[in-house]
């Protein structure tokens, strides 16, 4: 027997000559990448549709706000003094105070401020129970396909109607 202990030699394992991924690993990686890219593509398309809908909604809301401002401007111009001094109206403050909202509605229709917005459609009405309120109804189709038709309703108290209480 040999008294000397033989040193342990650790032999490296033989490696396969072709290192890399197996066919199964490559297929799984390809499916994962395809699934992730499909999700990213869908999110991109969804965000573009949302952006377009938001842009359309902003345009409609801006149109409504502009129209409300025009109506309020004309209402502020229609004072007790202008009603009595304007020859084209052929009316007195007492006549206008009989139904202030109908008077304001007729005034807005005469200057064609109501029908100048193609989208949304504007309808005006006055309530016979409360002749001091003019109701503007804005009807439009929502840009989002899941919502459908929408309405914005604005009540306006004619500016000059505060002078009507002095006549009574």
Image (cartoon, rainbow, N blue to C red):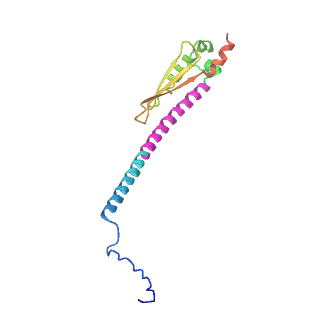
Q: Nearer the viewer, residue 23 or 135?
A: 23
Q: Position of residue 154 (x, y in %)?
A: 54, 25
Quick one: which residue is furthest to the left in this view? 23
Q: Position of residue 86 (x, y in %)?
A: 60, 20
Residue 78 in which image quadrant: top right
Please determine whether, in this image, residue 47 is positioned above or below residue 143.
below
Q: Position of residue 28 (x, y in %)?
A: 34, 58
Instruction: Tell me, yes or no, whether the highlighted magenta stretch contains residue 48.
Output: yes
**Residue at left offset 57%, top offset 31%:** 69
- Position of the C terminus, as image quadrant, is top right
- Position of the N terminus, as image quadrant, is bottom left
Q: Position of residue 114 (x, y in %)?
A: 49, 26
Quick one: which residue is furthest to the top in this view? 168
Range drawn in magenta: 47-76
**Residue at left offset 47%, top offset 37%:** 57
* Magenta span dominant secondary structure: helix
Quick one: which residue is furthest to the front in this view? 1
Q: Nearer the viewer, residue 20 or 138?
A: 20
**Residue at left offset 32%, top offset 74%:** 16
Instruction: Tell me, yes or no, whether the highlighted magenta stretch contains residue 28.
Output: no
Q: Is residue 137 rendered to the left or right of residue 12?
A: right
Number of numbered discs present?
A: 0
Q: Nearer the viewer, residue 111 or 23?
A: 23
Please determine whether, in this image, residue 84 is positioned above or below residue 59.
above
**Residue at left offset 30%, top offset 63%:** 23
């Amino acid at each position: 027997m040999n008294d000397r202990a033989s040193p342990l030699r650790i032999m490296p394992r033989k490696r396969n000559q072709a290192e890399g991924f197996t066919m199964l690993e490559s297929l799984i990686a390809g499916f994962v990448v395809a699934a992730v890219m499909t999700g990213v593509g869908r999110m991109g398309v969804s965000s573009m549709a949302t952006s377009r809908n938001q842009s359309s909604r902003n345009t409609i809301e801006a149109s409504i706000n502009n129209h409300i401002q025009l109506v309020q401007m004309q209402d502020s111009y229609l004072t007790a003094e202008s009603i009595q001094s304007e020859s084209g109206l052929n009316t007195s403050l007492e006549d206008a105070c009989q139904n202030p909202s109908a008077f304001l509605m007729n005034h807005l229709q005469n200057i064609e401020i109501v029908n100048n917005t193609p989208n949304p459609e504007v309808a005006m009405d006055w309530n016979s129970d409360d002749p001091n309120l003019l109701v503007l109804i804005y009807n439009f189709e929502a840009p989002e396909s899941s919502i459908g038709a929408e309405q914005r309703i604005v009540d306006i108290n004619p500016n000059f109607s505060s002078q009507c209480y002095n006549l009574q």
